[in-house]
Amino acid sequence: NNGVHVQNGVNGHHDDSNPKVNGVHNSEYIEADFTERYTVYSQDEQKYENVLKQHKITTEKRVPKLGVMLVGLGGNNGSTLVAGVLANKQGLSWETKNGTQQANFFGSFTQSATAHVGFKIDEKSGSLADVHKPVKEILPMVNPCDFEITGWDISQMNLYEAARRSKVLEPDLLRQLKAQLENIKPLPAALNQDYIASNQADRADNILTGTNQEIVNKLREDIQQMKRRTDKVIILWTANTEQYYLPEIATVDDLADKIKNNDPLPASVLYCIAAIEEQVIYLNGSPQNTFHPGVVEYARQNGGLLAGSDFKSGQTRFKTMMSDFLIGAGLRLSSVVSYNHLGNNDGKNLSEDKCFQSKKISKGGVLDDAIASNSILYPDGHASIDHEVVIKYVPFVGDSKRALDEYTSQIFMGGTNTISSYNICEDSLLAVPIMIDMLVLGELLTRIKIDGNGLGPVLSYLSFFFKAPITNHSEYVVNSFSRQRHTLINFLKAAAGISPDDQTLIGFGY
Ligand code: NAD
């Protein structure tokens, strides 16, 4: 049989009526025994030890009714997410100049990607084949069509007008959704105008007033309203990129003082505090430094859950794949130069330097782990690579963002290898499926316990979706596209009672 020995042929079968060895199902939980294997080195890396650790991973099976609250509901991403979910829920199709288009979730990892979950062996011929499963089928997950969505925006425009303003979706689709979208109006928002570009002032007609504490209280009331209508709530910041707030809020006391003394804080900090106090997840889709040490500690103390920052949708995703490919192949990537131009409101906001600086920082660190992984090519660390990022606002191109990248590597015997890429993408149509993923998976992570403990305060398994991921180990961040994807998939598989791939293929006589 090709050297294949299947130990306990029923492992991983998910059949409620017939509990199995791994991934045992009962009516409420999936319980998986998982043996984690890794190698630990001494500080001088001269000695190592292989570690085997037993874990019990428990996943609550009941999928809740999920309430999604978007900060920036009326923006390009916000309005596209609402219209996209409604269109999918109703199975709509619409006319375009290229023919009829059907609603889909392309670009969503949970809804449209598959994962390698194992192998099957033909009993007669002994031939070997892969088994892939849709990611959404590995564990019970919320269906995005069932999201209940509301949110805040500094612009009071209803979502039909907001979607038209965004110029992302086709008119024939928006016409079909007109009545529903017109009914959705953003809640009044927290805003500190000093932290976003001054060119945003003309859309700010829907603002909460009051002290820091009063505004946090009002945001909490909005969240409580949503809690009454749903089982669980997640807040997702998809509003304008804010300027960095410095110096960082170092401690919980520092944070409390700033709230009490009514120090001018960026709005994102107030939303995040409200989320932590309501014990709902707060996801940060923009680059600003909302997750100050004092804020993360406050979340730890209050059972808050955080993940971010800055959606990793286009250029950065590509960059972390290119560095996997080049550095992983032993080529010395020596210069990475990225130009972007875009004409949507995000681009307008980023045209002011204080906001662009936040984006530059977030895009700047994405190669660090790839460089640190190879001391042959980079004995001096990341200082030895040139990495530049330029972003320009060009209104005419609207949401259709252009990203021009040049990757130059030093190759064998002093040669040079230059790869240029030119990416034209509709920015919000790449970002929205990722937003859907972080909502679906963020919710799932709240139902998972490892050895009896919940995850958090940082939901690091969502790193795959963020440009500048934060983790529960501030010194340890993975940016590599392939590693992030493996980590997430292997974690989901382990929770489902399916063995993560060790990729050796030894047992199959490969
Ligand atoms: P957008 O400007 O169209 O939308 C932002 C919305 O937020 C606007 O409607 C604005 O009125 C609102 N807003 C601003 N401040 C607010 C506040 N304090 N409270 C509530 N609402 C507020 O931008 P977008 O294209 O939808 O992108 C949203 C964010 O996502 C940006 O910060 C952008 O940098 C980030 N991002 C987007 C992508 C992508 O689209 N591919 C990728 C990475 C990050």
Image (tube, grey):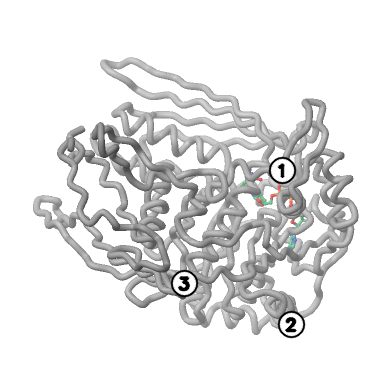
- Front tag of 2 and 3: 3
Disc 2, SS: helix
> Mark 3 belongs to which amino acid?
Glu
Image quadrant occupied by the N terminus = top left
Q: Is residue 196 found left or right of 234 in the rendered image?
A: right
Residue lying at the far front of the rendered structure: 124
The residue singled out by tag 1 in the image is 103
Distance of label 1 from label 3 (alpha carbons): 30 Å
Whether residue 360 is visible to the viewer of this picture, yes or no, is no
> Mark 1 belongs to which amino acid?
Ala
Image quadrant occupied by the C terminus = top left
Disc 1, SS: loop
**On screen, residue 298 above or below 282:** below
**On screen, residue 203 above or below 483:** below
Residue drawn 51% across the image and 43% down it:
113
The residue singled out by tag 2 in the image is 214
Q: Picture quarter containing residue 450?
A: bottom left
Whether residue 130 is visible to the viewer of this picture, yes or no, is yes
Q: Is residue 103 found left or right of 49 in the rendered image?
A: right
The residue singled out by tag 3 in the image is 60
List x then y, in percent, for residue 245. Answer: 60, 63
- Front tag of 1 and 2: 1
- Residue 377 versus residue 470: which sits nearer the camera? 470
Residue drawn 86% across the image and 52% down it:
160
Q: Residues within 10 Å of mark 2 (few under 14, many from 20)?
A: some
The answer to which of marks 1 and 2 sits earlier in the sequence is 1
Residue drawn 84% across the image and 62% down it:
184
The answer to which of marks 2 and 3 sits earlier in the sequence is 3
Distance of label 1 from label 2 (alpha carbons): 41 Å
> Mark 2 belongs to which amino acid?
Glu
List x then y, in percent, for residue 367. Answer: 42, 41
